[in-house]
Image (cartoon, helix red, strand yellow):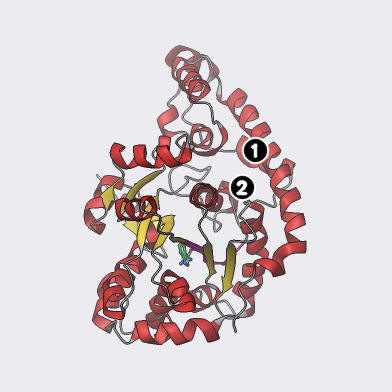
Amino acid sequence: MPSNEEEMVVTPWTVSGKIDYSRLIEEFGTQPLTDDILKRIEKHAGQLHLQLRRGLFFSHRDLDWILDLYEADRRFVLYTGRGPSGPVHIGHLVPWIFTKHLQDIFGSKLYFQMTDDEKFLIHPEFNLETPTRFAYDNALDVIAAGFDPAKTKIIMDVESAGTLYKIAVKIAKRITFSTVKASFGFTDSSNIGIIFFPAIQAVPCFLETELTGENVPCLIPAAIDQDPYWRVARDVAPKLGYFKPAQIHCKFLPGLGKGGKMSASLPETCIFTTDTPEDAEKKIKNAFTGGKPTVEEQRRLGADPTICPIYYYEYYLFEEDDKKLKETFDKCKSGCLLCGEHKAKLAEKVQRFLKDHQKKREKAKNVLDEFLYKSN
Ligand code: TRP
């Protein structure tokens, strides 16, 4: 029997239960990423990015239109963001790595929004300083992802309120309470800050247009839980003379526990970018796997990589080579590869990744100011 625990909930603030991505495409009214679109991207990229090849990005709105424009020599901007409610873990990096790839192939400018205001409004226990502090800390991880400093601006919502507000009021005037109630599930007891907030998250979709006076389309790579924001933004765009923002949606990176996405509120199931090599190794060693309770059984019956976070990490992030990945899958299934061995292999890769990321993160401190959007 499906228990409440298993029921799928996907909102910008809660993701739980077993996620059925085809159902989300239907319920949210988005489009699946077709082979045709993938081929078009491949033509520009030279080779399909791992996250496209393996279906991590799986759905979109108007991406075909963005490609049409690009192929007709029109530029577009990229927009993504982060709700800074804690330290960054490797699940957060997934869409950023992909966004950097899009910046590389299309040469696009990127607006990266840090919603310290949103996190203040939805976490009853936060004072305003807490998410703002995380925003500056998390920005180091964004920079470490390798974005082009000449083409990337990080917007700190509270700090840049002046610029954002002037555009947000125009947007807010076109959104009714009943629309946001239906899209976000707000109730009479929701605070009025969060009711207004969807207008703030819509602003970067139109910022380039507002700043330059040229109507510039925007493409948003983001996890699918952010979709309600884009539905509202798309609704108001034509009323204000803007293009509707396009999206490309990704799945959630699972945590190291049994089921569920990687979540900072369960620290033992996620690898933070600032974890020491020992911490990371320990978490991986303690992870849930698709293995059998005893070595004998596993040798005899094999393991199940399709439910195994250790395998997912290779799949989504750490094993570029499709052939090697397939070998790992086969070895898991046949009982050749034991979970302890697989964990040790993954831990090594994760440690290498963290070491490199942490070096870049340190260097980012010197260029942070250059990346910050400055209001005029
Ligand atoms: N609301 C997002 C979060 O809580 C942060 C965010 C703002 C965002 N703008 C975005 C995420 C654009 C993706 C794309 O994480």
Q: What stretch is highlighted in magenta?
A: 78-86
Judged from the image, the secondary structure of the residue bearing numbered disc 1 is helix
Label 2 Cα crowd, 10 Å radius (few <14 / some 14-19 / many 20+): many
Q: Which amino acid does label 2 sit on?
A: Ile
Q: Which residue is drawn at 61% across and 55% down?
A: 147
Which of labels 2 and 1 is toward the front? 1
Q: Which residue, given by chain and number where applicable, does mark 2 sit on? A: 271
Picture coordinates of residue 239 (x, y %)? Answer: 26, 79
Locate residue 233: give its quadrant.
bottom left
Q: Which residue is drawn at 62% across and 77% down?
A: 374
Left or right placement of residue 348 versus residue 180 in this view: right
Locate residue 43: give its quadrant.
top left
Check contact, mark 2 vs mark 1: CB within 8 A: yes
Label 1 Cα crowd, 10 Å radius (few <14 / some 14-19 / many 20+): many
Q: In this view, does 49 lie above or below 9?
A: above
Q: Which residue, given by chain and number where applicable, does mark 1 sit on? A: 350
Left or right placement of residue 227 versus residue 358 in this view: left
Magenta stretch: includes residue 94: no
Left or right placement of residue 247 versus residue 30 in this view: right
Left or right placement of residue 66 versus residue 320 in this view: left
The quarter of the picture where the C terminus appears is bottom right
The answer to whether one can see residue 71 in this image is yes
